[in-house]
Amino acid sequence: MDIELVIAQMRTYAPVFAQRVAGAAEFKALSEKTAFPMPAAWVIPLEDSPERPKSLNAVRQDLAESFAVIVCIDNAVDERGQAAVITLHTVRAAVWRALLGWRPTLGHNGVYYDGGTLLQMDRAQLWYQFDFAADMQIGPSDGWEETMLEGLPALNTVHVKTDVIDPIVDKSLAPAGPDGRIEFESDISNLNL
């Protein structure tokens, strides 16, 4: 999943973060940085979950691309976390409004919610992770075949030889069906394929 697209969507449609949405590779690096305004959000990539290929001779596979939105909420007013959890419900609603059903690209189905989990809580902050995914299909244009086909020369002419099923000549001499004699030949040119 291109997390830049998710970040832009969140910045536009989740005003609760006041543009404080960024990307990261993992949670550990985030939790070590504490000097930033809250609430804030980070988008991190998660695993891809591919299905088995749909055929043996073509590239066609369903894929669920996953990502997480990790939020950090101020917990300083209540060490037990009750106030932060109440805020978390509001933040979750804002994240859902920004992402659920959104299609990151024309090739993706709508984003769906895949669960959430508490990551960490201390006297100052509550960290929570919301998991999302969007299904897409891997196709021929994603694999090597498309590149290989682009390297082939253009098809400009087709030469057609026709052996008719019911010969036009004396039908009493041969049974109905192709007899190996070419009755017609033709060149089709300027195909521009």
Image: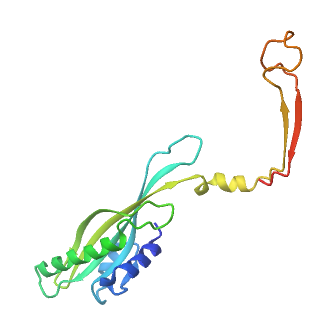
In the rendered image, residue 130, in percent from the top left (x then y), is placed at 29, 69
The vertical placement of 146 against 124, above or below, is above
In this rendering, is residue 102 above or below 162? below
145 versus 71 height, above or below: above
x, y (%) of residue 192? 80, 54
Residue at 30 percent across and 71 percent down: it is 96
Q: Residue 11 location in percent, x, y?
A: 39, 81
Along the line of sight, which residue is nearer the eye, 100 or 144?
A: 100
Picture quadrant of residue 171: top right
Q: Picture quarter containing residue 70?
A: bottom left
Q: In which quarter of the image is residue 117?
A: bottom left
- The figure's colour scheme reads rainbow
Q: What residue is shown at x 88% (from left), y 41% (from top)?
A: 187
Q: Is residue 175 left or right of residue 110?
A: right
Front-lying residue, 118 or 134: 134
Pick whichever, 90 or 66, lies toward us: 90
Pick whichever, 193 or 74, lies toward us: 193
**Residue 147 left/right relative to 122:** right
Residue at left 33%, top 72%? 69
**32 in relation to 177, above or below:** below
Residue 63 at x, y = what percent?
Answer: 45, 54
Image mark count: 0
